Amino acid sequence: MKVITKINEMQTYINKMKKRHTIGFVPTMGALHQGHMSLVAAAAGENSRVVVSIFVNPTQFAAGEDLEKYPRPIKKDLKMMKDSKLVACVFKPEAADMYPEGFASYVALENDMPQVLCGVTRPSHFKGVTTVIAKLLNIIKPDRLYLGQKDAQQAFILEKMMKDLNYETVAVICPTVREKDGLAMSSRNSYLTPEQRNTAPVLYTSLQMAESMIELGERNPETVKKEVRRKLKESQAEIDYVEIIEAGTLKRCEKLCGRVLIAAAICIGKTRLIDNIIMDIKD
Ligand code: AMP
């Protein structure tokens, strides 16, 4: 497994590799867990070479967020990827090389997609995400890009960016990998104290309750959201948002029909957790 830190070295390596191989690309911020590894496995199943990036992207963190304290267990990450035998190359650029002095070319969606859900409390977050992924796609030129449904808003925004900007890379969205009690795996789960960790599964169970209500015929999103909020309030979690909107476009829906995204974000202590369920409503 090759580990490359320099952008020009990565470009040379990719240009050679592309002549003989299809490339599946998995962008990450490191602190890898089974969620990340499921994307690696999906990429290995559909491409002849897998490239993983590890980059804690400063432009997607606002002042006061957890950029400095974000976990960076790089040795452990590299071992996990090497042991999997699925990864050909890890790209681990430096922030100073990705954003040299005078960097000015940001990529951002100008519709509402980056402003809803997580965008309400993190208004500049998705501009950082689209910018870094645009750069990584230009460097790695993968055939397929692997993203987790865990970050559904991010995945839909990136799909839209890739369509609007005519990237030939195909986006593949993979299912959320969960702990036994339903909590979505996340690098940020390591911030939780044991007591907070016991509370955390309430996020997914609340979303599952919403799913059941819809399965049983409820079609008013406000009624479902109210019940989810009530259930979340019973725990020590603080609600950031509970939303039920159109999957893909992230547009409001008055009446639940088609493919919908049930999404919520909560804070437990200082740790912010997000999760979602996507449902296909037939009638
Ligand atoms: P991150 O390192 O948090 O930026 O995540 C890198 C990629 O892994 C993103 O596409 C995430 O959506 C995905 N991911 C994170 N957690 C999970 C999970 N529990 N299941 C599946 N994919 C995940």
Image (tube, rainbow, N blue to C red):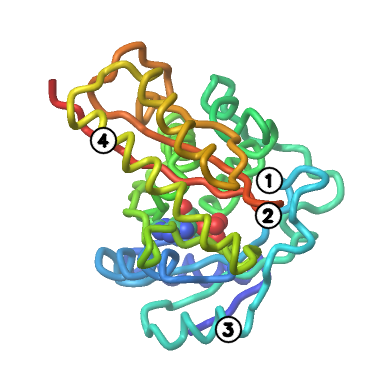
Three-letter amino acid code at the position of disc 4: Met
Report the mark closest to the observer, 4 or 2: 4
Q: Earlier in the sequence, mark 1 or mark 3?
A: 1
From this view, report whether residue 32 is shown above or below residue 134: below
Three-letter amino acid code at the position of disc 3: Lys
Label 3 sits on a secondary structure element that is helix
Where does residue 76 sit, x and y in percent of width and height? 58, 83
Quarter location, residue 210: top left
Q: Report the residue marked by disc 1.
A: 60
Are discs 1 and 2 less than 8 Å apart at CB? yes
Q: Earlier in the sequence, mark 4 or mark 3?
A: 3
Where does residue 51 sit, x and y in percent of width and height? 46, 68
Q: Report the residue marked by disc 3.
A: 76
From this view, report whether residue 144 is shown above or below residue 213: below
Crowdedness near tag 3: few (<14), some (14–19) or many (≥20) residues, C-alpha within 10 Å: few
Q: Residue furthest top?
A: 254
Crowdedness near tag 1: few (<14), some (14–19) or many (≥20) residues, C-alpha within 10 Å: many
Q: Report the residue marked by disc 4.
A: 279
